[in-house]
Structure formats: structure tokens, C-alpha cells
Image: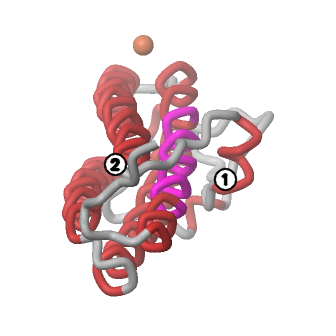
């Protein structure tokens, strides 16, 4: 096969591919979690959250495709198994429970913030360790999208601590 000659060494491209596969895995987990809450949510904010999460998973689906195809463009192969995504993700799953709407939003804020921190670190490594300004720019665009999604979610629980939300409130959702 003809070698890829875009001004990056094999080692530089592999370093970037590894970062992108980690991001791909986080995005897949976030896609699953966002869809699950889109399906499960109940309460007075049902319609708003149901629709917002559809917008978010639509954007995530498009971004997942872009990350995977960028990995191919750099000569690598995207992770494509559930086991592979679980191995690489930095997000935590919450199997078997049915949180209230507030807790769903709070958990997704935590996930988006984790992804933003990861992307910030990966942007720096792409630029400084691997000399790949193209991927750094690509990830910067994705980080901006997650910052906006996190803000939208945070706005639902404005004035309440995201940290405290991990303790389930006794207050029914309907009275909030
Ligand atoms: Fe739907």
C-alpha cells in the first residue's frame, strides 16, 4: 500500500488515532446514555428534555461518524465493538436504575464536562506532541459543541449543585 505522506510520521498518526478512538468510545457511551434518557424521561419537562436529547443524539451520531472517518483518513481503524468502546471510555454507566429527570440531566452534565476536559487535553497533545494541527482544530470544534450542550443541560438545573444531585432527592419531580 502506498504510504500516507501528509507531513506526519507513522508514530505521530498512531498517537492521534489512539486519542481519537478514546474520544469515539466516550461519544458512543454518551450516545447510548442520551438515547436512554430521551426514552425514559417523565415529568413536567418531558417534552423539552425529550426533544433536546433528540437534538443532542443526532449531533452525537454525526460527530461519531466524523471521528471514525478521520481515523480512517489518518490510516487507522476505528474501534467498532461494544466491548472495545467500554474498554476505552472514561464515562460511567448506570445500569438498572431509573433516575428522575433532574438526575438524568445532572449525570449528562457530568459526562459532557468529562468529555470537554478530555478533548481539551487531547487538543494540546495533538498540537504539541504529534504536530497535527488539523486534528487539534477538528477536536476544538467538537469541544465547542459539547460546551454548548453542557450549558443547555446545566440551564435545566440552574441554581442546584450538580454534585449534590447524586444524592436522590425525596422531592417528586412534579413539584420542582
Ligand atoms: Fe425518539
Say if the magenta span includes residue 22: yes
Q: How is the image coloured?
A: secondary structure
Residue position for label 2: 153
Sequence-wise, the earlier of marks 1 and 2 is: 2
Relative to 68, does residue 110 appear above or below in the rendering?
A: below
Which residue is at 71% across, 44% downward? 84
Range covered by the magenta-colored residues: 18-32
Residue 161 on image: x %, y %: 45, 68
Disc 1 is placed on an element classified as: loop
Where disc 2 sits, the SS reads helix
Between marks 1 and 2 in the image, the one whose residue lies nearer the viewer:
2
Question: Is 56 placed above or below 149 here?
Answer: above
Q: Measured from the top left, where is residue 28 in percent x and y?
A: 53, 39
Q: Does residue 74 appear in this view?
A: yes
Total numbered labels placed on residues in the image: 2
> What residue is pinned by disc 1?
168
- Badge 1 density bin: few <14, some 14–19, many ≥20, Cα 10 Å: few
Q: Residue at x 50, y 27 (%)?
A: 35
Amino acid at each position: 500500500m502506498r504510504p500516507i505522506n501528509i507531513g506526519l510520521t507513522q508514530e505521530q498518526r498512531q498517537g492521534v488515532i489512539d486519542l481519537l478512538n478514546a474520544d469515539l468510545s466516550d461519544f458512543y457511551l454518551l450516545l447510548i446514555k442520551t438515547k436512554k434518557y430521551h426514552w425514559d424521561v417523565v415529568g413536567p419537562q418531558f417534552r423539552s428534555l425529550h426533544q433536546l436529547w433528540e437534538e443532542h443524539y443526532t449531533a452525537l451520531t454525526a460527530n461519531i461518524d466524523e471521528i471514525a472517518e478521520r481515523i480512517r483518513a489518518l490510516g487507522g481503524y476505528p474501534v467498532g465493538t461494544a466491548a472495545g468502546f467500554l474498554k476505552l471510555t472514561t464515562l460511567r454507566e448506570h445500569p438498572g436504575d431509573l433516575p428522575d429527570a433532574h438526575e438524568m440531566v445532572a449525570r449528562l452534565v457530568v459526562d459532557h464536562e468529562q468529555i470537554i476536559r478530555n478533548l481539551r487535553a487531547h487538543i494540546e497533545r495533538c498540537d504539541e506532541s504529534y504536530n497535527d494541527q488539523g486534528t487539534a482544530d477538528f477536536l476544538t470544534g467538537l469541544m465547542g459543541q459539547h460546551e454548548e450542550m453542557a450549558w443547555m443541560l446545566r440551564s435545566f438545573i440552574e441554581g442546584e449543585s450538580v454534585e449534590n444531585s447524586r444524592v436522590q432527592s425525596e422531592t417528586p419531580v412534579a413539584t420542582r
